Amino acid sequence: MKQLRLWAGPDGASHFEEFEVAFRVTEYVPGFPSEITGPRVARSIHFTRLPVGAFQAWHTSPHPHCAITLAGEVEIAASDGERRRFGPGELYFGHDATGQGHETRVVGEQDWVAAVVTLAD
């Protein structure tokens, strides 16, 4: 499964990077084999809502996190100039804790609602 990470490079700019996460067959629910990825340790989960047109100027990720869009659409601009949009069911990992960071803008016609999983450092 391809996933997307936003990270801070040694140049001080944030960059998007796709990476592959492997599945393995296991019985997460006893007696019912399914494919799962390896676990990631999380500290907490919260839900966030930003209104249509909301804009957050350059900022870094306060903690390593996974943002999963539940409704609406958000555009993330990395400081290297690349922009990506995330709609319902799409996610990204925020790991750009240093450097210039990224910008966040809610696009489209509905509020952006996301589940944000704060990962262990």
Image (cartoon, rainbow, N blue to C red):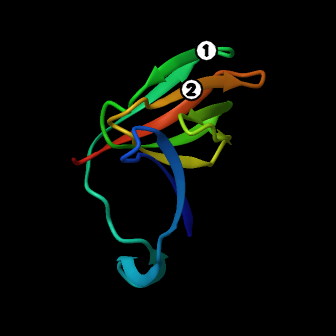
Which residue occupies 30% across, 36% down?
63
Query: For the view shown, which residue lies furthest in the right direction?
Result: 109
In this rendering, position of residue 97 left or right of residue 73: left
In this rendering, position of residue 67 left or right of residue 84: left
In this rendering, position of residue 72 left or right of residue 6: right
Q: Looking at the picture, how far across and down is residue 9, in whole percent?
A: 40, 47
Which residue occupies 33% across, 37% down?
97
Q: In front of the other: label 2 or label 1?
A: 2
Query: Secondary structure beneath disc 2?
Result: strand
Q: Quadrant of residue 94?
A: top left
Q: Looking at the picture, how far across and down is residue 12, in whole percent?
A: 39, 38
Q: In this figure, which residue is indicated by the disc labeled 2?
A: 104
Which residue occupies 33% across, 43% down?
64
Above or below, comparing residue 18 to residue 66 in the picture: below
Q: Looking at the picture, how far across and down is residue 86, in whole percent?
A: 65, 41
2 or 1: tag closer to the N-terminus: 1
Q: Looking at the picture, how far across and down is residue 7, in whole percent?
A: 42, 46
Above or below, comparing residue 63 to residue 59 in the picture: below
Give whichever of 23, 100 is nearer the camera: 100
Q: Which amino acid is tagged 1?
A: Ala
In this rendering, position of residue 41 left or right of residue 59: left
Location of the N terminus by quadrant is bottom right
Which residue occupies 52% across, 18% down?
56
Q: In this figure, which residue is indicated by the disc labeled 1?
A: 54
Q: How would you rate the neighbour count of disc 2 (Cα within 10 Å): few for under 14, some for 14-19, many for 20 or more?
A: some
Query: Secondary structure beneath disc 1?
Result: loop
Q: Quadrant of residue 54?
A: top right
Q: Which amino acid is tagged 2?
A: Thr
Q: Could you tell me if the residues under marks 2 and 1 are in contact, i.e. CB atoms within 8 Å?
A: yes
Q: How would you rate the neighbour count of disc 1 (Cα within 10 Å): few for under 14, some for 14-19, many for 20 or more?
A: some
Q: Quadrant of residue 36?
A: bottom left
Query: For the view shown, which residue lies furthest in the front direction?
Result: 11
